[in-house]
Image (spheres, grey):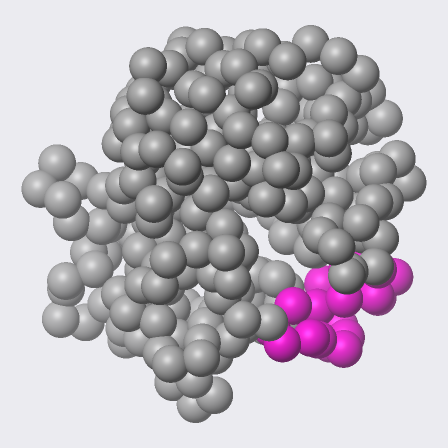
Amino acid sequence: MSGQVTSIRRYPVKSLLGEELDAVSVDAAGLAGDRRLALLHRETGRVASAKNPYRWRALTTLRAAVGGDGAVRIALPDGRSVAAGDEGVDAVLSDLLGAPVALVDTPPPDAVLERSRPEEVLAAGVAVPVPVDEGRLGAAAPPGGFVDFAPVHLVTTATLRRIGAELPSGVVDPVRYRPNLVLDTAGPGFEENDWPGRELRIGADLVLRVVARTPRCAVPTLAHGRLPRDPEALRVPARLNRVVPLDGLAPQPCVGAYAQVVRAGRVRVGDPVRLA
């Protein structure tokens, strides 16, 4: 497989909308500034995640970006914004989310989040509580960040086209699947299924090792900013690509792949990509 980087996306705060970049440095922890902050529920100690949409679906109405001064700013739905260092940021976000939260830059020991069972969310809707499973953060990542599993998340344009072809609109916005890198490739889609154990060479320096297919939760179905809620964003991969994401797990709807960083480097839109 050969292709090129067509989009770079960073999410400074876990589960919030992020920002599109032209270039960024990547090291063992992932993209510089990616998922370095998160909201912590002060009563339970759990990391707030839209994977439990009944409790946290409002997270995908907020957008985080890194300013020129290096500070993370969060844009609110009403047009206001707050900075990570503002004195009242926790109170503003707690009021907006209807739960006591704190914006933190260090995961608590043995940090966990709740993941609603996606099929039950599809059946019941996001406004109904459904059973959740608890999961640990960053099992395949260095400590200190808030990534779900591994530091870099990849999705190909071929896979997005395959999903989009099954939707009434004919397209699917990649933001629903929250990739760090969108790779422009030809083919029928879901080629990421064959990548675990192989290396991707990107641009002049960056080398990634793919470690797992990405199992999808209910997050793609949620409203993302101006994108409306769309359960088909999960139903389509559930129908077309229910596979084992990682040895020892049951088949699940998968879109994209997780990767670790073998050799750090800088990635730019337009960089060539080659599967070794």
Q: Position of residue 105 (x, y in %)?
A: 26, 65
- Please state which of residues 60 and 133 is positioned toward the viewer in this rendering: 133
The boundaries of the magenta stretch are 114-134
Residue beneath the point at 45% across and 10% down: 272
Residue 227 in view of the camera: no
Residue beneath the point at 35% across and 33% down: 263
Q: Quadrant of residue 233?
A: top right
Q: Position of residue 189 (x, y in %)?
A: 76, 22
69 left or right of 219 in image:
left
Residue beneath the point at 47% across and 88% down: 44
Residue 156 lies in the magenta stretch:
no
Vertical placement of 132 versus 13: above or below? below
Residue beneath the point at 50% across and 50% down: 150
| Quarter of the image with the N terminus in it | top right
Q: Position of residue 165 (x, y in %)?
A: 81, 20
Vertical placement of 92 versus 234: above or below? below
Vertical placement of 87 versus 173: above or below? below
Residue 156 in view of the camera: yes
> Given the current orientation, which residue lies at the most extreme bottom position?
43
- Please state which of residues 113 and 66 is positioned toward the viewer in this rendering: 113
